[in-house]
């Protein structure tokens, strides 16, 4: 990793990116020039919704539908739902059981993006990421919910492109 790079993560990917950058910092790994997180509250903030990874099938599927990132057709294909249900539950288990451990802020710029009507995070949850960097912090809210970019991908790609051009 001898060229400048940035990390982008959405939803659980935001946590994965955040933890990966911390791990690399603590273990003399490569350091990105920018961290971009999307669709997730600051890691130290409590979840807005109760966990569903162990809930009955209908409760779990209702939560998945409410997030808005899964095509409606998926829920009509019972065999596919049954096939993917264990994997989806495992993803939710990782996401819902994440435990933040206090760590020093990152010394790199942090850009946070989210939907104004996201059921998983509020504007203050997004703004709370500020404490996780000593670098520049920017917050961008878009119209939409958890998968805000599904209706206007160009706004997100323009923003990410601008960050990459400026920092990489």
Image (cartoon, helix red, strand yellow):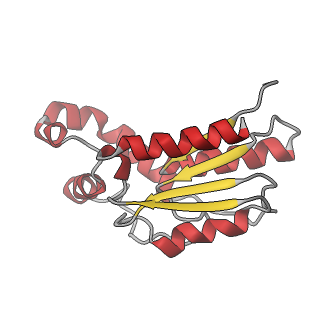
User: Which residue is at a point 58% across and 70% down the rendered structure image?
Assistant: 127
Quadrant placement of the C terminus: top right
Image x and y of residue 65, in percent: 23, 53
Looking at the picture, does residue 61 appear above or below residue 125?
A: above
- Residue 53: tell me if it is visible: yes
- Which corner quadrant of the image does residue 144 belong to? bottom left
Image x and y of residue 130, in percent: 67, 67
User: Which residue is at a point 82% across and 62% down the rendered structure image?
Assistant: 104
Looking at the picture, does residue 50 appear above or below residue 163?
A: below
Residue closest to the eye, 35 or 142: 142
Q: Residue farthest to the bottom?
A: 124
Image x and y of residue 101, in percent: 71, 63
Residue closest to the eye, 36 or 155: 155
- Residue 44: tell me if it is visible: no
Image x and y of residue 82, in percent: 22, 36
User: Which residue is at a point 71% across and 63% down the rendered structure image?
Assistant: 132
Looking at the picture, does residue 137 appear above or below residue 5?
A: below
Would you say 117 lies left or right of 108 here? Answer: left
Q: Residue farthest to the left?
A: 76
Residue closest to the eye, 117 or 60: 117
Quadrant placement of the N terminus: top right
């Amino acid at each position: 990793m001898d060229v400048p790079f940035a990390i982008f993560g959405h939803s659980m990917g935001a946590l994965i990116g955040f933890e990966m950058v911390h791990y690399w910092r603590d273990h003399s790994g490569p350091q990105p020039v920018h961290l971009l997180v999307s669709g997730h509250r600051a890691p130290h903030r409590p979840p807005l919704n109760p966990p569903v990874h162990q809930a009955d099938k209908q409760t779990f599927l209702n939560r998945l539908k409410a997030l808005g990132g899964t095509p409606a057709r998926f829920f009509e294909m019972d065999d596919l739902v049954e096939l993917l249900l264990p994997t989806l539950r495992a993803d939710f288990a990782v996401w819902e059981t994440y435990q933040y451990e206090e760590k020093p802020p990152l010394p790199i710029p942090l850009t946070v993006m989210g939907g104004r009507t996201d059921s998983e995070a509020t504007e203050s949850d997004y703004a709370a990421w500020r404490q996780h960097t000593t670098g520049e912090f920017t917050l961008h809210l878009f119209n939409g919910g958890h998968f805000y970019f599904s209706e206007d991908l160009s706004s997100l790609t323009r923003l990410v492109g601008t960050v990459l051009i400026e920092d990489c």
